[in-house]
Image (spheres, rainbow, N blue to C red):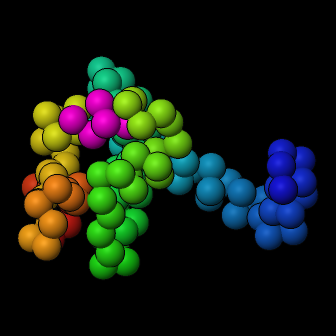
Amino acid sequence: MRGSEEAAALAPVLSADNAEQLLRLIWQIQAARREVFPDDRLPEASWEMLSELMSLEFAGRRITVGGLCLAASCPVTTALRRIDELVELGLIVKEQDPADARRQHPAIRDQRRGCA
């Protein structure tokens, strides 16, 4: 599904009240993102990586650096730079895989979770 097909598929699901609630949620997420990253230093690929890592954490799963690069929907070299930037910002850590020293698993840093 693309564009208008997606909108048509969602139309029966979203009432005017639900659409307004969804829009308010989107605005709240955007406001929170601007509050945490006021200088707009966080490119979209980085935001996608953070979302992916949080989703995996909720599911109790892990991902490798290579897997996160693929999930970022950008060139691998760009994704690797973004991962390094997220580490520098203190938002994520790269944990060594105890079974394979060549492999690392990026994870959300505990202090940034907002819940414990």
Residue 97 visible somewhere in the drawing = yes
Q: Residue at x 16, y 40 (%)?
A: 87
Residue 81 x %, y %: 29, 30
Q: Quadrant of the N terminus?
A: bottom right
Name the quadrant containing residue 90. Answer: top left
User: From what the image shows, is residue 63 above or below residue 33?
Assistant: below
Residue in the image at 55% along x and 48% along y: 26
- Percent across and percent down for residue 110 are 12, 60
User: Is 82 or 109 nearer to us in this picture?
Assistant: 82
Q: Quadrant of residue 52?
A: bottom left
Q: Is residue 86 magenta?
A: no
For this view, does 24 lie left or right of residue 80? right
Nearer to the camera, 112 or 107? 107
Q: Residue at x 29, y 69 (%)?
A: 62
Q: Position of residue 115 (x, y in %)?
A: 20, 66
- Left or right, 75 with respect to 11, comes to left
- Report the residue at 21% width, 35% height from top: 84
Left or right? Give the position of 60 relative to 114: right
Instruction: Say how many tags the image has.
Output: 0
Quadrant in the picture for the C terminus: bottom left
Residue 57: quarter of image = bottom left
Region in magenta: 79-84
Where is residue 98? Give x, y as percent: 9, 70
Q: Nearer the viewer, residue 60 or 33?
A: 60
The residue sitting at the top extreme is 39
